[in-house]
Amino acid sequence: MIIESIELKNYRNYDELHMDFSQGTNILYGDNAQGKTNVLEAIYVCATTKSHRGSKDKEIIQFDRDESHIKLNVRKNDIPYRIDMHLKKNKAKGVAVNGVPIRKASELFGIVNVVFFSPEDLNLIKNGPAERRRFVDMELCQLNKLYVHSLVQYNRIVTQRNKLLKDLAFRPDYEETLDIWDMQLVQYGKEIILYRKEFVEKLGMIIEPIHRKLSGDKESLRILYEPDVEAESFEETLRRSRGQDLKQRTTLTGPHRDDLSFMVNGIDIRRFGSQGQQRTAALSLKLAEIELVENIVHDYPILLLDDVLSELDNSRQNQLLAGINHIQTVITCTGLEDFINDRFHIDKIFKVINGTVDNEN
């Protein structure tokens, strides 16, 4: 799985851009706020239809433009794919694969698998549960199209059910329609719970030896899935919580409230771990994510490292760099000296200055 090139038009601070990538390590360097991360974001958008920043399409398009275009050329198992992304300010985005328009995001997922690692990800362990759910969702959506369908349907139903719960203050006669929404909520919610449970179990088997190595054989890491409700008891729990749902006018139970916990030598580091332990666990999580993709799709993902090396100490830098020298990587950084040049082979170097990219090879 290799990204061969990318083209951008009217994308954030890029009027027009064309870049050809090496199959190995690609470095984008330059001062802050020059547009390095925008290139990684565009790759991520083509893989997942979403910005890793959570940005809306209209925020990505240049201020004085109505549309933006991304074209990503990928080679997978020696088969070329061209992903065309047409972002619009006031309409849904258009997506085509090899010139053929697609109607559902699930048709795009899996063509190119990416793992995105940014400084914010180092706080994944200590931040709120929404970020950990997003991590699970984004990876599962790339690996399992059935999960995409279940998640989309579940989120739609939660939104509609919450709207109904608010409307009941004015139309109490609508309460009997809750049964219909609850039936669908349970159906798709159960599927999500089972998919997440399987995913976390597989991830846990991979992450334990990785973390043990990162910690110098001093720590054993277990990752645990914490469902808000078990699949087999979801229907009953939802029924019992209806009174509270009506009172608070929101859906209080379901996989939209799930979480993960990280246990190091039996201690929950989400609550009681040091910053160093939390960061090492986050690094283990990303390295395990890479291996999990390879195990499932039998090909390594593309790794996008957004200025994350500057946030790691020398030991963790070395561990990360040693673990990724066999896959295509796109790295952003502010400088080339010290932590990269002396320890890591670079295949292609780009200098980024205010929306222009120069190939320095």
Image (cartoon, rainbow, N blue to C red):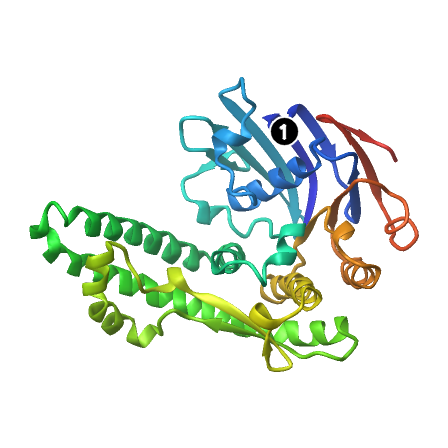
Asked if residue 158 lies left or right of residue 341, the reply is left
Which quarter of the figure is the C terminus placed in? Answer: top right
- Which residue lies under the disc numbered 1? 8
Name the spot of residue 99 as percent of width and height, x first.
52, 33
Q: Residue at x 86, y 33 (%)?
A: 360
Asked if residue 225 lies left or right of residue 38, the reply is left
Looking at the image, which residue sits at the far bottom? 266
Q: Nearer the viewer, residue 351 or 70?
A: 351
Q: Residue at x 78, y 44 (%)?
A: 26
Asked if residue 132 lies left or right of residue 28, the reply is left
Name the spot of residue 263 as percent of width and height, x first.
59, 76
Q: Hey, which quadrant is residue 194 in on the image?
A: bottom left
- Say few, some or many: other residues with alpha carbon within 10 Å of mark 1 (under 14 / 14 to 19 / 20 or more): many
Asked if residue 300 lies left or right of residue 255, the reply is right
- The three-letter code of the residue at mark 1 reads Leu
Q: Nearer the viewer, residue 129 or 61?
A: 129
Above/below status of 34 relative to 252: above
Name the spot of residue 47 as percent of width and height, x first.
56, 45
Looking at the image, which residue sits at the far top? 64
Q: Secondary structure at mark 1?
A: strand
Q: Residue at x 75, y 73 (%)?
A: 215
Name the spot of residue 308 as percent of width and height, x first.
72, 51
Above/below status of 281 relative to 336: below
Q: Nearer the viewer, residue 85 or 38?
A: 38
Q: Residue at x 71, y 78 (%)?
A: 219
Is residue 118 in view?
Answer: no
